[in-house]
Amino acid sequence: MAKKEAAKTVKVKQTGSPIRRTKDQRATLVGLGLNKMHKVSELQDTPEVRGMIRKVHHMVEVIEG
């Protein structure tokens, strides 16, 4: 039997504050598992997650691991 390949992940760190941002950007941060400054969240690398990161790219940093 072939081994199942591990799902690729991406680590995202919040670097910007959600203060004075639109509600949808705040909701996107919560959807990424971020709600406090400098918090890191590890997520599956899917097109949906990449789109969310792109939407709030000015408030997050992708950590290569």
Image: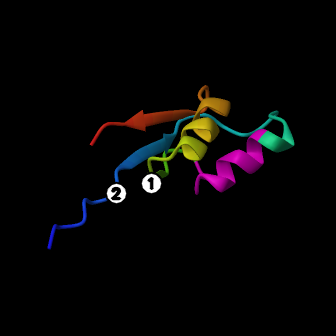
Tell me residue 34's x, y (percent).
59, 52
**As rendered, which of 13 and 55 lies closer to the eye?**
55
Which residue position holds label 1?
Answer: 44
Colour theme: rainbow
User: Residue at position x 63%, y 40% from top?
Assistant: 52
Relative to 29, is 63 on the left or the right?
left
Which amino acid, by three-letter code, is at mark 2?
Answer: Ala
In magenta, the rendered stretch is: 25-36
Residue drawn at x 34%, y 51% is 8
| Residue 35 seen in this snapshot | no
Q: Earlier in the sequence, mark 1 or mark 2?
A: 2
Q: Secondary structure at mark 1?
A: strand
Image coords of residue 10 (percent x, y): 40, 46
Q: CA distance from mark 1 to mark 2?
A: 7 Å
Q: Within 10 Å of the Cα at label 1, are there few (<14), some (14-19), or many (20+) other Cα atoms?
A: few
Depicted 47 relative to depicted 43: above or below: above
Residue at image mark 2: 7
Tell me, yes or no, whether the two marked residues, 1 and 2, touch with CB atoms within 8 Å: yes
Q: Check the image and name the residue furthest to the bottom.
A: 1
Q: Which three-letter amino acid code belongs to the residue tagged 1? A: Gln
In the image, is 8 to the left or to the right of 59?
A: left
Q: Is residue 31 magenta?
A: yes
Q: From this viewpoint, is residue 54 visible?
A: yes
Residue drawn at point x = 80 percent, y = 34 percent: 21
Q: Residue at x 66, y 37 (%)?
A: 17
Horizontal and vertical percent position of residue 1: 14, 73
Local SS, label 2: loop
